Amino acid sequence: MSEYQHVEILYAEDNPTDAELTLRTLKAKHIANHIVWVKDGAEALDFLHCRETYAGRTNGMPKLILLDLKMPRMDGIDVLKELKTDERMKTIPVVIMTSSSEETDLVRSYQIGVNSFVVKPVDFDKFADMVEEIGLYWMISNKTPA
């Protein structure tokens, strides 16, 4: 079985430090076992549409998408637009995790249909706590359609 078949979380983040801390926290707290980290929005869409590097992936949408806003090649807003207009993906919960505290980013994200918008704390421990809270809520408490 491919490592991409039963993904629980698709994580799009270009900052390797933030990605490392997020992945480590989610795994250490046993919130998710199958996480795929992609480094930009274009790669996230390639994963979801099973193309390019992920062309061999045959099934399984993630239960949650964690999405940064400011990424190379394609930003999080463009990814969110595509997700929320695609019938197969529009019900997947999307949490924007960004360093941007710009009101325009917040408003635009909610207008497009984001499920949650979180500004990443600079403090290491607060960042880890935030990731744990997000993971517990969206992966354990939240219920989504099958």
Image (cartoon, rainbow, N blue to C red):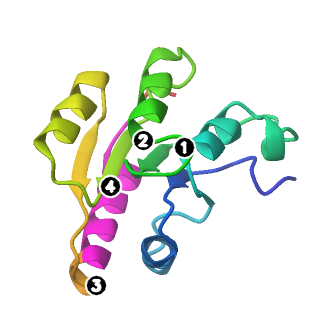
Residue drawn at (82%, 35%), measured in percent from left and top?
58
Q: Mark 1 points at which residue?
A: 41
> How far apart, in angstroms, are the residues tagged by discs 4 and 2?
10 Å
> How far apart, in angstroms, are the residues tagged by discs 1 and 3?
25 Å
Q: Name the residue under label 2.
A: 76
Q: What residue type is labelled 4?
A: Met
Residue drawn at (74%, 51%), measured in percent from left and top?
4
Binning the other alpha carbons within 10 Å of mark 2 as few (below 14), some (14 to 19) or many (20 upward) gives many
19 displayed left or right of 51: left
Q: Callout 1: helix, strand or loop?
A: helix
Q: Callout 3: helix, strand or loop?
A: helix
Q: What residue type is labelled 1?
A: Gly
Asked whether the beta carbons under mark 1 and mark 3 sit within 8 Å of each other, the answer is no
Q: Which of marks 1 and 3 is in front?
A: 1
Q: Callout 2: helix, strand or loop?
A: helix
- x and y percentages locating residue 83 in the rendered image: 49, 27
Q: Is the magenta stretch mostly helix, strand or loop?
A: helix
Rendered image: mark on residue 97: 4
